[in-house]
Each structure stands twice: as structure tokens, then as C-alpha cells.
Image (spheres, rainbow, N blue to C red):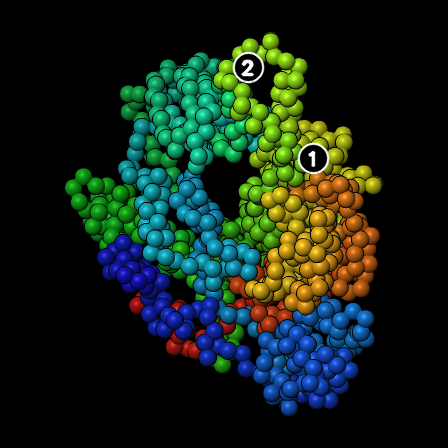
């Protein structure tokens, strides 16, 4: 059964009470799904008599700067620019001129050494391209294609937590989303498979089971989850959701008991482990008010749940439950010797899953279950059938309006009420269980899973219209919080006051800690900090210990079992080898997940500092500070930094650090497993800093290592290999852009540590950019980028943020929008707040293309169909 039919089946059977199938009912899915271009929504070129003329203004410029290589019979790069006979012919190929515009901006055309366009000529060409081929109306900017976006995995989890008030780990049930244009919230990449749809149905059942009460009143109960148990050390971020079984950890929770008496205490814990088995063991000690409740020895397991129950006699007042983890020490040096060659890529974790306190036992007191007021508006449901149905409609309309992030029509409400009624009218069922079943339908609905937006009223002949304020509230919240709108956004939108208060709301949302999700998701994907933990870099090879370590391992394997039990009689040679083995292992194992988390946090906290303090975005290119803790400072060779907590550190005046390019996060994720990769690093800078990504390499391009044949028995440097590689005409143009940037970073190894030599050969970081500027090292490169290429960086960040904000790739119709935002950044010295405000105020964020009226009606009236 295909996906559309599955949705229709679910709607028909009541599993899903309203669906995206109705939205698609009037559309031909293959051709006219929102987000795809249709004949009716294509941009048609329009000329502006006030703008430049192709024949009179543009052709003379092309003749002077371009025809020598791309005209008069020349076809360099298989690119011909003198084949247009008329203005109409030239304006009919916007993609061609988009390529021209990008190359002009990047300084690739005209090539270095040739005459360059004057500022006036460049402005003339840009203006003609935007007005002619791109058909941009400067007074009514095109917002771009319509997108219907599925909630990605994190948006789904955040929305569930905000809507349902329940702890839910979306990563355990859903796979990671695919990415498009660098981000996993782009509509084109957010496909829905039958398997994923089944998972949404499973998730809805699980979430409702955990969050929606099944009865009206219960004995008083307090429930705590793992994140409620925190470390006594305020500097620590540890909590009971995940405690490392290989480290000593302690977390606790205080709570209040109002009435003295006997209480049932139920403690649920879980054991977790890596995909591969880990032999590590640990003791867990649970104390209730400093008295030991239980001690367990635990280890690797796959999500194993253990429950311990007890009855406690408590006085009124504060009480405390604490959990302490202590690793089980290895019994002897012989065990160390026998297992030391095992790589430590596995792990064991302990989780405080749920602590429930119920009582006092025997009390007649009854209260609403936790979370009751979130879903139900009265103290108890009515008993009369008509009144119960009316109350069900009230409850479900309130919930569905929040869940669907917009108004809900009466047909949908009636379906939901009917579904609830079929359950709560059965013997043994409660009103609450019926509401829960209807909520399963809401959470399974594509109306919840997809962000479907509506346009505000507009004139009949309008091509574009503002999205309505409810849709704007949703766009804002998923942009800055990766979650649903809060009550304040919804209230303003429902009153038609959101646009009037937009600037204040943006500032409020950025100041809110929920914007941490924006930093994590946008920065994590733009700068690839998400990839740091899993960066596949072999520390033993990079540090130059691989060969020695393997010899020592072979030596250990050759020794008889039990050899180290008689360590008092060991020879000096054996002692030295063992000491050397342990020394190397300690150095190599220093590159662990804790260090990688610090490496990731450096970049994310650095960008967060720039964002929250509204300093210039150019600090991301070059500055004299960063964020470090003692471990990362030691990794960098920076002295006088102490403690586990990351904090702002002013760098020494002679430090090469400062800015994104010198942070280990970027340097690690752009390296190969055993060495640096100037090509990957250069590509990263082109794509994420300068916004001029190189095209994919042709399939026939030889591997870089094949260039080593030119050097006989001598091992060449990477600079020499790349120099030979560039001799291939297929490689030269792209590598001329990438290689100087990547080679400038060769003083940093694949782990981000500073070095003066590579395999005994001095590093040569000097280079020349494709635009002709020269530099001697990474310090000068950073200064060049900050001082000479600020506009390119502003444009790149703007494009990345716009893609993240609107969920689609940049189109040529967005060029004027981006130019306007870059102008505002330049005037404000690159303040981040200006960038965010400008993106939110832009046409792509504020408006929507209008489809022909029949299709627009299908989209806006889908719930009634």
C-alpha cells in the first residue's frame, strides 16, 4: 500500500482523524505537490525599461572581459557567453546567468591577472541579471517555492515535550533524518516511508500512554525522571539520564513531603551499553535520606529495566534520593596486561529511568494525576452523555488547535469526539482513556507531523501573499526554538498582533534558553560540530605511535598468561616496555569522548558568545579569544587554564588560534583517518565560510596518492602531491581555489594540535588565493578573510541561515533578498541580531507564493474534505 493510500486508510478507520491526504486530494502528487515547481507557479521573465539593456549595456562589458575565453569561438570550461542573439534569448536562461553571477562574485571570472570589472560595471551586470533573467520585481520580492515540511526528528521530540509535558527520547525510536543543502530540516530531504509512518503510530501510542492520565483522581503521587537527578557540583552538567559506568558519579534529587506517613517508593533504573559488548562493571548505591536502599553491581546491557520497591515512613518536610556510581576496579596487573590491547571504543551507561513516590498509604485524599490540567479543563467530567460529548469537544478542540498549530474545523473535531466516545462509552473505560485514544489520532495525523501553512487574505490577482500570523508564529518558533509556538506567540498571532510586535518577539526568543536548540542545530550542521564525536581519526597514527604501539602489543601477546603476577621478578627491560606501553596508551586514550565533547563545545559556545553578545560575525573569522577548559587547553598547548568547565579565554598574543578555522572541531571533521586533508579543509572554507563551493570532482580524476609516482622512492609532502595533481587540467581550476586555503592549515594535525613539521618535513603554510592575495601563514590568511572578504562571508552565513529558516535551498529569485540582508550586515558591522531580524523580515520568511485559486482552495480547505 503506497503512502498516500496508507494515510487515507488511517483516516477512514479512525486511526488518523484528519490527514495530509485531504490536502493532496486536489493535487497531482507527482507534479504539483507543494514545494515542487508547477507551470502555474514558474517565474516568467519581465523586462524593466528603467534597468540596463542587454545589447547596449551588458554586451560591451562581456566583450571586454569575457569573450576572449568564452566567445569568438573559444569555449573554455565548455562555457559560451556570446551565443545570444537578443534580449529575450538571453533572459530565457536564468540558471546560466546565475552561474555567471556566482563566478563574478567569487572573483573567479575574470581570472586573476586579467582586467577586472570596475565597481560600476559589476553593479550594472548584477542589476541586469536580477531584473532580466531572474525577473525580480524589487518592489514585490518573490518568496520562492511553497514547502510543506515534515517535523524532523528533533523538532518532533521538542514539540512532543512542549505539547505533552512528557520525557520522550526521539533518538531511540526514529532514525536520523537525511539532509538537504546541509540541513536536516529542508523539505526536499524529509521523506516519509511506510516504516517511518508505522513508527509515528507507535510513538503516538507510547507518548499518550506516558502523558495522558487514565483516571480523574488518584492517591497523591510524585514522579521524577533521570534529568531531575543532578550533581551536587554546580559546575557539572551530569544528570541521571546517562551516567558513565566507568567514572565515579553522584546525582541526587530533593523533594517535599507535605503529610507524614508511609509511602510507596518505586525506583526504576536502566542499563545501557554500546553496540559491541563492554566488560566494564560498576556498583550503584541508592540512598534514601542517607540510608542505603540498595546496592547493585551492574554492567553492559541493552536497555534493561530493573525496578526496586520499598515502603518508607516519612515525616513532613524535605527528603532526598541519591545514586552513586563506582567503577569496579580491575583485580590485578595481569588483567590489565591481558586486556590492555583491547580498544576502548565501547561503553556502559546507567540511567535513573523513573522514581515514583505514592502516599501516604491509607489516605482518603485524592488528587488529579500528574499532567491532568494540561489536557482537562474541569475538575471531573460530566456524567450525562450529551454533556460528556460537549466536554470532549471542548477538550479535543483545545488540544488539536495547539497540536495542529492552527484552527481546527468542526468536521475534524466531530471525528475526534466520535473516536473518544467509542472508547469511553465501553464498560470499564474512563472518559480520560477515550480522550487519550483521540489524542493518539491527533499525534498520528499528518496535520501534526507536517508544517502546513496558510496565506493571509490577498487580492485576487496577487502572486504572493503574507502567511497568516498563526503560520508566522510557527515559522518563528521552529526557526529559533526547533519547537512549537509558546502561549505568548499564539496569543499575539490569534489577536493579529504578532507582526506589529515582531522585533520584540525575536529578541525575546533569542534570549530564551530554548534558543539553545537553534545554536545546536544550526551551528551543529553549518559548522559540522555534530560530527565531532564520531570523527574517525586514528590518534595513534596521527601522534606517530602506531608502529611502536603495534610492536609492544605483539610483545604482550607473546608473553605467557600470568606473566605479570610475578612482576617483582620482572627484568628492567620488561618494566621499561610496560611503562612505555602505558605511557603511549594514556596519550592516545586522551583523545576520548570527553575531549571531543570539549572540542565540540568550544565551537558551539564560541558562536553562542558571538550571537548572545551581538558582536561582529567577523570574530568568527579572526579574533583573540576562544572557549577552553583545562583538558582542551592542554591539547592546544595553552597554559594557565584550569577546571572542567568551558569558559572564555583570551589567547596569548603569539597564538595562531582564534576564529573557526583554528578550532579542532573543523580541523578534525575535515581530516582523513590517518592524516590531514588540505582538499577537505579547503572545500570546507569555500562552502561554509566564503560560500563558493567547488563543483563535484569528475569521475575520472585520479586519486591524490597516485601523484606520488612522480617522486620515485622519496615520500612527497602533501603540498608536492597537490602540485602534481593540479597539473591535470580537470583538476586545476578547482584545486587552485581549494588548495591554498587547505595548505594554510597544515600547521594543525588531524587532531587539531599545532605542529611545525609533518613526517620530519617543515610545514609550508604560505599561499596565494585565487583572487591574487598572498599570505605567509594561517594568521595572515585569517586577517585577509576578515579584512578583504567580509561580504563573501556575510553572504555565505546569510544563505546558510535562510536555508535553515525557510527549509529549502536558495533560488536565483532570492538574490535580491540576500543582497539586501548583506547590505544591512555591512552597515551594522556584521551583528548577528541584524542578520536574524533581516531573515525573519525577508520575503521568503514572511510570504508565500499563491497557487491558482482551485489549488489554493484545496490547501486551505483540506480539513473539510
Q: Nearer the viewer, mark 1 or mark 2?
A: 2
Instruction: Label 2, secondary structure: give it.
Output: helix
Q: Which residue is mark 2?
A: 564
Horizontal and vertical percent for residue 127? Answer: 69, 78
| CA distance for labels 1 and 2 | 33 Å
Give coordinates of residue 602: x percent, y percent. Answer: 66, 41
Marks 1 and 2, the one that precedes in the sequence: 2
How far across and how far down the image is residue 839, in percent?
61, 61
Q: Which of these two is toward me, 673 or 210?
A: 673
**Residue 125 drawn above or below residue 792:** below
Which residue is the extreme one toward the bottom?
85
Crowd around label 2: few <14 · some 14–19 · many ≥20 (10 Å): some
Residue drawn at x 34%, y 18% is 310
Looking at the image, is 485 positioned above or below residue 117?
Answer: above
Residue at mark 1 = 635
Name of the residue lying farthest toward the left = 427
- On the image, the x and y values in percent for residue 503 come to 62, 57
In the shown orientation, is residue 238 left or right of residue 193?
Answer: right
At x 61%, y 12%, the residue is 570
Identify which residue, 568 or 619, lies in the foreground. Answer: 568
Quadrant, the C terminus: bottom left
Can the viewer see residue 684? no
Residue plotted at (25% across, 50% down)? 420
The quadrant in which the N terminus is found is: bottom left
- Left or right, 619 with respect to 554, comes to right
Residue 410 falls left or right of residue 60? left
Per the image, label 1 sits on a secondary structure element best described as: helix
Amino acid at each position: 500500500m503506497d503512502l498516500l493510500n496508507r494515510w487515507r486508510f488511517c483516516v477512514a478507520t479512525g486511526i488518523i482523524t484528519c490527514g495530509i491526504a485531504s490536502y493532496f486530494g486536489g493535487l497531482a502528487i507527482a507534479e504539483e505537490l507543494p514545494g515542487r515547481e508547477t507551470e502555474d507557479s514558474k517565474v516568467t521573465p519581465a523586462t524593466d525599461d528603467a534597468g540596463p539593456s542587454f545589447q547596449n549595456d551588458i554586451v560591451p562589458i562581456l566583450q571586454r572581459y569575457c569573450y576572449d575565453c568564452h566567445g569568438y569561438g573559444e569555449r573554455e570550461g565548455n562555457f559560451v557567453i556570446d551565443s545570444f542573439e537578443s534580449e529575450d534569448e538571453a533572459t530565457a536562461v536564468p540558471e546560466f546567468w546565475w552561474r555567471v553571477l556566482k563566478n563574478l562574485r567569487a572573483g573567479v571570472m575574470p581570472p586573476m591577472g586579467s582586467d577586472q570589472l570596475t565597481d560600476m560595471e559589476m553593479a550594472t551586470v548584477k542589476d541586469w541579471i536580477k531584473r532580466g533573467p531572474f525577473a525580480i520585481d524589487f518592489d514585490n520580492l518573490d518568496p520562492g517555492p511553497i514547502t510543506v515540511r515534515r517535523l524532523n526528528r528533533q523538532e518532533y521530540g521538542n514539540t512532543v515535550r512542549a505539547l505533552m509535558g512528557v520525557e520522550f527520547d526521539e533518538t531511540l525510536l526514529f532514525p536520523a533524518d537525511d539532509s538537504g543543502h546541509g540541513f536536516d530540516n529542508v523539505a526536499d530531504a524529509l521523506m516519509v516511508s511506510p516504516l517511518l509512518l508505522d513508527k509515528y503510530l507507535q510513538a503516538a501510542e507510547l507518548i499518550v500512554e506516558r502523558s495522558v492520565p487514565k483516571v480523574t483522581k488518584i492517591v497523591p503521587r510524585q514522579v521524577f525522571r533521570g534529568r531531575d537527578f543532578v550533581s551536587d557540583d554546580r559546575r557539572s552538567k551530569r544528570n541521571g539520564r546517562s551516567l558513565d559506568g566507568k567514572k565515579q558519579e553522584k546525582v541526587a534529587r530533593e523533594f517535599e513531603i507535605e503529610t507524614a506517613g508511609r509511602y510507596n517508593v518505586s525506583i526504576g533504573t536502566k542499563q545501557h551499553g554500546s553496540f559491541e559488548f563492554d566488560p566494564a562493571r560498576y556498583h550503584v548505591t541508592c540512598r534514601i535520606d542517607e540510608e542505603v536502599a540498595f546496592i547493585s553491581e551492574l554492567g553492559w546491557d541493552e536497555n534493561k529495566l530493573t525496578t526496586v520497591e520499598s515502603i518508607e515512613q516519612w515525616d513532613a518536610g524535605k527528603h532526598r534520593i541519591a545514586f552513586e556510581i563506582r567503577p569496579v576496579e580491575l583485580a590485578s596487573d595481569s588483567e590489565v596486561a591481558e586486556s590492555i590491547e583491547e580498544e576502548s571504543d565501547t561503553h556502559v551507561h546507567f540511567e535513573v529511568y523513573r522514581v515514583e513516590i505514592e502516599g501516604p498509604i491509607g489516605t482518603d485524599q485524592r488528587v488529579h494525576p500528574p499532567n491532568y490540567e494540561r489536557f482537562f479543563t474541569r475538575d471531573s467530567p460530566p456524567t450525562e452523555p450529551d454533556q460528556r460529548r460537549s466536554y470532549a469537544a471542548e477538550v479535543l478542540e483545545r488540544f488539536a488547535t495547539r497540536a495542529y498549530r492552527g484552527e481546527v474545523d468542526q468536521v475534524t473535531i466531530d471525528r475526534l469526539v466520535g473516536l473518544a466516545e467509542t472508547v469511553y462509552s465501553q464498560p470499564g473505560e474512563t472518559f480520560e482513556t477515550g480522550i487519550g485514544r483521540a489524542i493518539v489520532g491527533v499525534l498520528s495525523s499528518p496535520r501534526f507531523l507536517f508544517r502546513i501553512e496558510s496565506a493571509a487574505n490577498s487580492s485576487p490577482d496577487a502572486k504572493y501573499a503574507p502567511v497568516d500570523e498563526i503560520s508566522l508564529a510557527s515559522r518563528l518558533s521552529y526557526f529559533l526554538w526547533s519547537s512549537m509556538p509558546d502561549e505568548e506567540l499564539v496569543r499575539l498571532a490569534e489577536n493579529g498582533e504578532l507582526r506589529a510586535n515582531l522585533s520584540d518577539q525575536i529578541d525575546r526568543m533569542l534570549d530564551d534558553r530554548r534558543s539553545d536548540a537553534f545554536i545546536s542545530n544550526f551551528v551543529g550542521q553549518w559548522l559540522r560540530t555534530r560530527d565531532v564525536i564520531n570523527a574517525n581519526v586514528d590518534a595513534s597514527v596521527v601522534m606517530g605511535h602506531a608502529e611502536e604501539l603495534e610492536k609492544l602489543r605483539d610483545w604482550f601477546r607473546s608473553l605467557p598468561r600470568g606473566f605479570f603476577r610475578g612482576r617483582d621478578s620482572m627484568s628492567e627491560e620488561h618494566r621499561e616496555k610496560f611503562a612505555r606501553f602505558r605511557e603511549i596508551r594514556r596519550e592516545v586514550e586522551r583523545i576520548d569522548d570527553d575531549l571531543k565533547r570539549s572540542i565540540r563545545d568550544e565551537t558551539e559556545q564560541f558562536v553562542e558568545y558571538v550571537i548572545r553578545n551581538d558582536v561582529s560575525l567577523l570574530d568568527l573569522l579572526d579574533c583573540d579569544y576562544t572557549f577552553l577548559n583545562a583538558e582542551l587547553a592542554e591539547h592546544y598547548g595553552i597554559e594557565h587554564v584550569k577546571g572542567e568547565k568551558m569558559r572564555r579565554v583570551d589567547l596569548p598574543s603569539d597564538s595562531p588560534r582564534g576564529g573557526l578555522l583554528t578550532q579542532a572541531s573543523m580541523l578534525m571533521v575535515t581530516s582523513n583517518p590517518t592524516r590531514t586533508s588540505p582538499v577537505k579543509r579547503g572545500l570546507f572554507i569555500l562552502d561554509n565560510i566564503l560560500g563558493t563551493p567547488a563543483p563535484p570532482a569528475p569521475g575520472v580524476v585520479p586519486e591524490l596518492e597516485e601523484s606520488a609516482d612522480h617522486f620515485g622512492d622519496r615520500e612527497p609532502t602533501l603540498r608536492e602531491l597537490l602540485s602534481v595533481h593540479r597539473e591535470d587540467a580537470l583538476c586545476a581550476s578547482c584545486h587552485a581555489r581549494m588548495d591554498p586555503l587547505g595548505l594554510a592549515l597544515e600547521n594543525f594535525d588531524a587532531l587539531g594540535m599545532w605542529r611545525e613539521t609533518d613526517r620530519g618535513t617543515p610545514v609550508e603554510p604560505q599561499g596565494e588565493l585565487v583572487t591574487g592575495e598572498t599570505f605567509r601563514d594561517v594568521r595572515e590568511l585569517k586577517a585577509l578573510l576578515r579584512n578583504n572578504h567580509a561580504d563573501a562571508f556575510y553572504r555565505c552565513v546569510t544563505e546558510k541561515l535562510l536555508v535553515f529558516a525557510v527549509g529549502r535551498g536558495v533560488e536565483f529569485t532570492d538574490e535580491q533578498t540576500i543582497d539586501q540582508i548583506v547590505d544591512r550586515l555591512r552597515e551594522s558591522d556584521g551583528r548577528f541580531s541584524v542578520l536574524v531580524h533581516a531573515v525573519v523580515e525577508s520575503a521568503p520568511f514572511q510570504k508565500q507564493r499563491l497557487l491558482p485559486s482551485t489549488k489554493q482552495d484545496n490547501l486551505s480547505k483540506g480539513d473539510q474534505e
